[in-house]
Amino acid sequence: MHFARLFIVSLIAVTAFAEPAKVVVLDKATLPPPTVQRDDEGEIVIKSAADGNTILYTLDGTDPVARSNPYLAPILLPWGGHFKARAFSADRKVMSEVVERKFNPAPGFKTRPSTVIPVTQDRSWPSYGWQKRHESLVAMVQKQQPSVLFIGGSITHFFGGQDLDLPLRGPKTWDEFYAPRNAANIGCGWEKTENVLWRLTHGAIENIEPKVAVVMIGTNNIDTCAVPDIVEGITAICETLHQKLQTTKILLLGIFPRGPVDHAARPKIVAINDAISKLNGKNNITYIDIGYAFLQSSGNISKDIMPDLLHPNEKGYRLWAEAMEPTLKKLLGE
């Protein structure tokens, strides 16, 4: 492994989906624990002691539970961290003891915030198949070879495109504005910046060359991460896109406003957007903030366009499309 490829990756929104049924995990650990190995360059490989088990892991020192991160590929962790892993049965009701490792940074690396360390996620398991969606999206973009690529969390996911899993909320607007442009939507529910980074470095954008990538991400980090760390995560996503898709123009959107006017997320969103606006003009990035399109004069968001004050409906997605259209047209050379 070369360090060069490591530098490519340089709010849990409770309303994002209906809360899945509670998963009961047996108190008694009855499965054999997985084995964990980390090489000198910081790559972690986990192996199950028995076929058919699911391995889940965490990097924040908490014990893995049924909705923790599924192990799908070797984990790059040269920056060090508090690592824990567990084996689970396929239904995640039976588990092993926790395997715990505290890793120091590899030579030449310093500790980094969670927002820039690529990880998987399963926060809405079993109602939402994150791994299945990722694999479907990888296959989709390879076949479609999109000219425009939308990247983000559930707000992006619900917009439109191929109906792979959950119902879409803005399909009419999508079909009018983006289907004729051969656009693809690789948004995923419950995504944080670190989850987008994992997908971007595990097949989501391989062997494609879109003209424009539309990026809107970060709202799911707001409840648990500091503003500078979220900014660093968004910046890492743009850097990864630029390194992997060097001719693609990146249309970076400010995080949309959410909640009532006095919601605790509002000032954090303003601070994040102010910081990422400074990426405009760098590495093929064009930044715009269209959050104003969703706000009334009072600063409130109407439930007529965002019923949960977070995810747009068809009316809200049309406001998004209309506000973005002049900039997108320019970037596409139309």
Image (spheres, grey):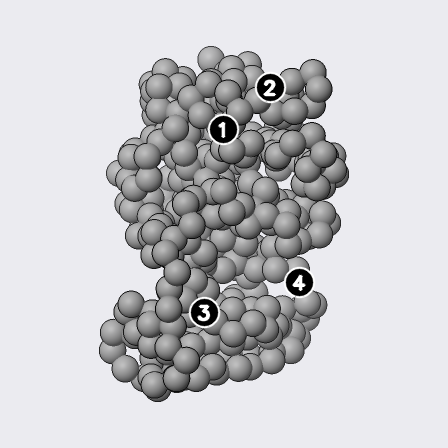
Locate residue 170, reporting x and y percent: 39, 25
Q: Which residue bears the numbered disc 1?
A: 307
Q: Residues within 10 Å of mark 2 (few under 14, many from 20)?
A: some
In terms of image quadrants, where is residue 83?
bottom right
| Residue identifier under label 2 | 293
- Whether pointer 2 and pointer 4 mark residues with C-beta atoms closer than 8 Å, the reply is no
Q: Residues within 10 Å of mark 1 (few under 14, many from 20)?
A: few
- Measuring 52% from the left and 74% from the top, which residue is drawn there? 63
Q: Nearer the viewer, residue 6 or 4?
A: 6
Is residue 218 rendered to the left or right of residue 149? right
Q: Which mark is residue 112?
A: 4
Q: Nearer the viewer, mark 1 or mark 4?
A: 1
**Secondary structure under badge 3?**
loop
Give the CA separation, mark 1 to mark 2.
15 Å
Q: Residue at x 51, y 33 (%)?
A: 308
Crowding at dot 3, Cα within 10 Å, few <14 / some 14-19 / many 20+, comes out as: many
Which residue type carries mark 3?
Val
What SS does tag 1 mark? Answer: loop
Numbered disc in front, either 3 or 4? 3
Whether residue 224 is visible to the viewer of this picture, yes or no, is yes
| Label located before the other in sequence (3 or 4) | 3
**Disc 1 vs disc 3: which is toward the camera?**
1
Element carrying mark 4: loop
Give the residue type at disc 1: Pro
Give the mark toward the camera: 2 or 4. 2
Q: Earlier in the sequence, mark 1 or mark 2?
A: 2
Image quadrant assignment for residue 298: top right
Instruction: Report the number of numbered marks.
Output: 4
